[in-house]
Image: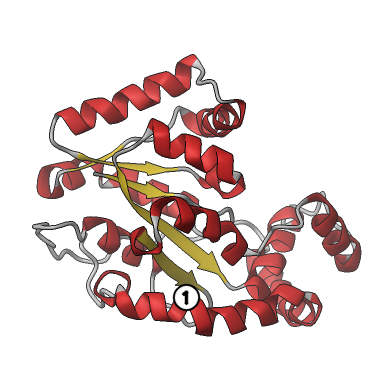
Amino acid sequence: MTILHIGFRKCASTAIQRRLLDTAEKLEARHGLAYLPFEKRAGRIQFQDDLAAQQLSASSLRFVGRVDEALARGLTPIVSNEMFEGLTPPSIARLKAILPSVSRVVAVIRDPRELIPSIYGFRTQRGANVRDFDQFYAQLQRRDPMRGRFLDVLEPWAEAFGWDAVSVHFMGAGSSDVVRDVMADMIATPGADLALRPHARVRANLTLGWRGIEVLRDAFAILGAARDEDAGQFIDLRGRQIEPLLAQRGDLVRRQPNDPF
């Protein structure tokens, strides 16, 4: 089997990949999991482009070879790529054909009311990209109308691999440590030994003036919630579609309070 973290940008993908990399040796020794990072960001983008072009480049072929090698050693590969957010159904079908061993798809969903202000805060944190929030939001919708519509993005993955294979985690105010939850989800394979260790060291953003930016992001969150038509849809569909899924897979997505590392 292979675990696929499809990743969403601004949904802790970098933090999850960093934790996977930091604990790679323990994951393999204790749980038989092999985290296979791409060749930097360019490799993740190239893999996405190759799926769309239906022709794998040399770097993508090397990556697929590493997955096959891990499987041959009796390990469970973990593939994480935030670029998968933009895959079309044909590209997802191509990915399934290239990696037929995929049996679990892990995703993190961020409340759209927090997502848009987070993107704005990230792009303006250095003061070089300051723009009117209304202008920023309108441009974002024109350039990436699917941004924040996680349920629309998830549906093709569920159609390809089945909802039973999709594990969903929510990221938002008041939620638990989503990185810890995703790690526990990946470890929860049949026969896995959940070794409990102290919570990992938290990496803080020490950018000068960051606290002030966070205050502004909170203010924009209130404005963004009023403007984001996806927010209401998200809350409605979460209750009707996603929460029942979580109830069925509660043994995986609600494992707490201990961190397996």
Q: On the image, which quarter does residue 243 sit in?
A: bottom left
Count of marks placed on residues? 1
Q: Position of residue 129 (x, y in %)?
A: 82, 51
Residue drawn at (8%, 57%) of the image: 191
Q: On the image, which quarter does residue 206 sit in?
A: bottom right
Q: Position of residue 241 (x, y in %)?
A: 49, 77
Q: On the image, which quarter does residue 192 sit in?
A: bottom left
Q: Nearer the viewer, residue 187 or 238?
A: 238
Q: Position of residue 201 (x, y in %)?
A: 33, 60
As drawn, the residue found furthest toward the top would be 58
**Amino acid type, residue under disc 1 in the picture:** Ile
Q: In the rendered view of the protein, which quadrant contains the C terminus? A: bottom left
Residue drawn at (45%, 50%) of the image: 160
State the SS at label 1. Answer: helix
Q: Nearer the viewer, residue 208 or 73?
A: 73
- Figure colour scheme: secondary structure
For disc 1, the neighbor class at 10 Å (few under 14, some 14 to 19, many from 20) is some
> Pointer 1: what residue?
242
State left or right for residue 37 relative to residue 149. Answer: left
State left or right for residue 240 relative to residue 29. Answer: right
Q: In the rendered view of the protein, which quadrant contains the N terminus? A: top left
Res. 206 visible in picture: no
Q: Position of residue 158 (x, y in %)?
A: 46, 58
Residue drawn at (46%, 50%) of the image: 6
Q: In this view, does 44 lie above or below 6?
A: above
Q: Which of 181 and 246 is in front in this view?
A: 246
Res. 259 visible in picture: yes
